[in-house]
Image: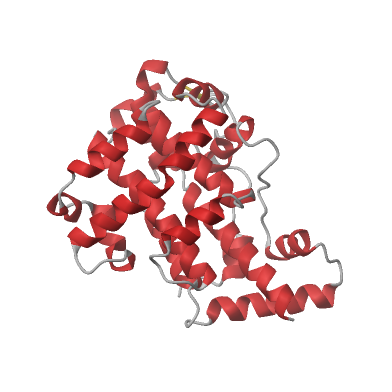
Amino acid sequence: MSKPINQRVDELPTKNVTIFSLRSLDFVLPDKWENLVGWDNTIRTITGETDDSLIQLVGDRAIALYNDKSQGYQTALWLYDTIDSAGSALGTAALANKVGEKVPLLGFLNKLTPKADKAQTIDLTLKLVVEIVAFCKINGIPGDSIGDFVRSLGDYSGESLMRMAALVCFDGLIPLGPDFVQAVGERLGMLSPSELEDNQEFKKIKDEIPGKNAEHKLGFMGESFESVRGWMSEFVSSHDLTPQKVSNRLQSFIEFSDDRLDYLAAFLDMSTDYYRHTGVQTLARRLIERSLAEI
């Protein structure tokens, strides 16, 4: 176990590239996401309670639940952390003192390497798999319960819905284009187990993906994507999303040309950790809600 969950929530940032990127999606989910930071503040906001003794009880119970290794909370957070760790701190470090300003991306281009379409396809699918497995861990159900996850998507809100919106926009539309759902499905169908085994992100989380070998795990990935492609397509169409609309919003704090969206995708990959950030918030919410119900 790394840092305690209360410390992780206390250390969530209020202003960085990740936050600005997520807030750029407010046009998709207006007022649907609040960047809750601070353990006590998060408990008070979620529970609506003001009594200090009750806040303490809820917090202590939530921490105890997280520390209980028989539960799946620590594994869920590890998954959120790990799927974001493949990026680099380059963008964050370079913009540390400029975040919020309109910073040209041009100077970073020689340091960025856009992912090939195959790598981007694997990245998006693995993030989706992490979402499914973490959902199962948090809710104490088998890790291959894709159907339960799909049914829950209709109830997604707050940071969880924002994470899925960012997945669609930052890992789908911008790098792969408006037809990314169809493209990902086709490329997954052509992917071999050996190609998957060569992927560094897969190597890190493969033990948590259902399936006894790479072939079976690839099958689970394909099944996961197929189960959610309808939701993704509906999300894009219902919000009338295009790569240009998403990139135009990002241009409020980054300058780049529209013919360099692959580099923009690489920049976001290297400078944001939206899975980790919103994952901490999701986990804190579930722990606090359960704790309030149990005390």
**Residue sitting at 53 percent across and 82 percent down?**
68
Left or right of 108 in this view: 7:
right
Q: Assign the C terminus to one quadrant of the image.
A: bottom right
Q: Quadrant of residue 65?
A: bottom right
Q: Is residue 131 left or right of residue 192?
A: right
- Count the marks: 0
Name the residue nearer the viewer: 266 or 246. Answer: 246
Q: Would residue 112 be seen by someone viewing this image from the given angle?
A: no
Q: Position of residue 52 (x, y in %)?
A: 84, 73
**Left-right relation of 283 to 255:** right
Q: Is 68 rendered above or below residue 84?
A: below
Give the residue at x 38% y 59%.
82
Could you say which is closer to the camera, residue 255 or residue 133? 133
Q: Is residue 264 above or below residue 132?
A: above
Quadrant position of residue 258:
top left
Above or below: residue 75 compared with residue 176: below
Residue 126, how many percent across, how many down?
34, 52
What residue do we see at 38% from left, 65% from top? 144
Q: Residue furthest right?
A: 51
The residue closer to the viewer here, 206 or 15, is: 206
Res 106 → quadrant: top left
Residue 1 point in image, percent of width and height: 45, 75
User: Which residue is pictured at 58% across the width and 42% down the height?
Assistant: 19
